[in-house]
Image (cartoon, grey):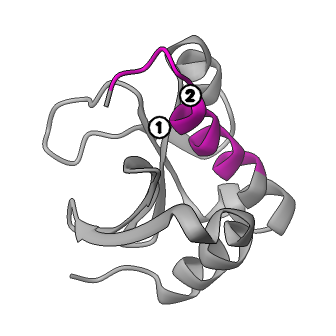
Amino acid sequence: MAYNELLADRIRFALLPHTLHIQEKKMMGGLTFMLHGKMCCGIVKDDLMVRVVPSKFESALKLPHSRVMDFTGRPMKGFVFVGEQGFQTDDALNSWLDLGVEFVENKSIVK
């Protein structure tokens, strides 16, 4: 399973405030980060994968370097892929990770 180790380290650092509740799992062809048992974000090759609440999904897709996650050939609702150019700075990465944390903390979304 190949995934960007540098990006994994950046995500680990960014999610430090949640460390007690984070688990890493190798799945979906890469590495995923589970927060409170729900998938928050992950890495597939060099792409960042982020879970997004339904109300922000369409607007997330309009952000630069983002696209629908479709690695199975079919779009996966609520999942966004972000290309490397979309998270080069720490601020950009943190903005994407905030969306993933928001997804997990949204009580109306069932696991």
Residue at 30% of width from left, 70% of height from top?
A: 25
Q: Position of residue 10 (x, y in %)?
A: 66, 78
Indicate left or right for 79 with 106 as reference: left
Find out whether the residues at labels 2 and 1 contact each other: C-beta distance under 8 Å.
yes
Q: Within the image, what quadrant is residue 26 found in?
A: bottom left
**Number of other residues with Cα within 10 Å of mark 2, as a class: few under 14, some 14 to 19, many 20 or more:** some
Relative to residue 26, is residue 43 drawn left or right?
A: right
Task: In this rendered view, identify the residue nearer to me: 20 or 81.
Answer: 20
Under tag 2, what secondary structure? helix
Q: Position of residue 84 (x, y in %)?
A: 59, 65
Give 60 or 107, whichever is nearer the viewer.
Answer: 107
- Which region is colored magenta? 95-110
Q: Is residue 50 left or right of residue 16?
A: left
Q: Which residue, as the protein is rendered here, is positioned at the far front?
A: 20
Residue at left offset 67%, top offset 66%: 15
Q: Position of residue 80 (x, y in %)?
A: 46, 39
Q: What amino acid is found at the position of numbered circle 1 in the picture?
A: Arg
Q: Residues within 10 Å of mark 1 (few under 14, many from 20)?
A: some
Instruction: Tell me the number on the disc at residue 67.
Output: 1
Q: Does residue 101 show up magenta in the picture?
A: yes
Q: How many marks?
A: 2
Which label is found at residue 80? none
Quadrant where the image shows the N terminus? bottom left
Which SS does the magenta portion mostly show?
A: helix
Indicate the amino acid at tag 2: Leu
Q: Earlier in the sequence, mark 2 or mark 1?
A: 2
Residue lying at 45% horizontally and 82% vertically, measured from the top left: 4
Find the distance from the CA under tag 2 to the CA under tag 1: 6 Å
| Residue that numbered label 2 is attached to | 61
In the picture, the quarter occupied by the C terminus is top left
Q: Residue at x 60, y 84 (%)?
A: 9
Q: Is 111 located above or below residue 10 in the figure?
A: above
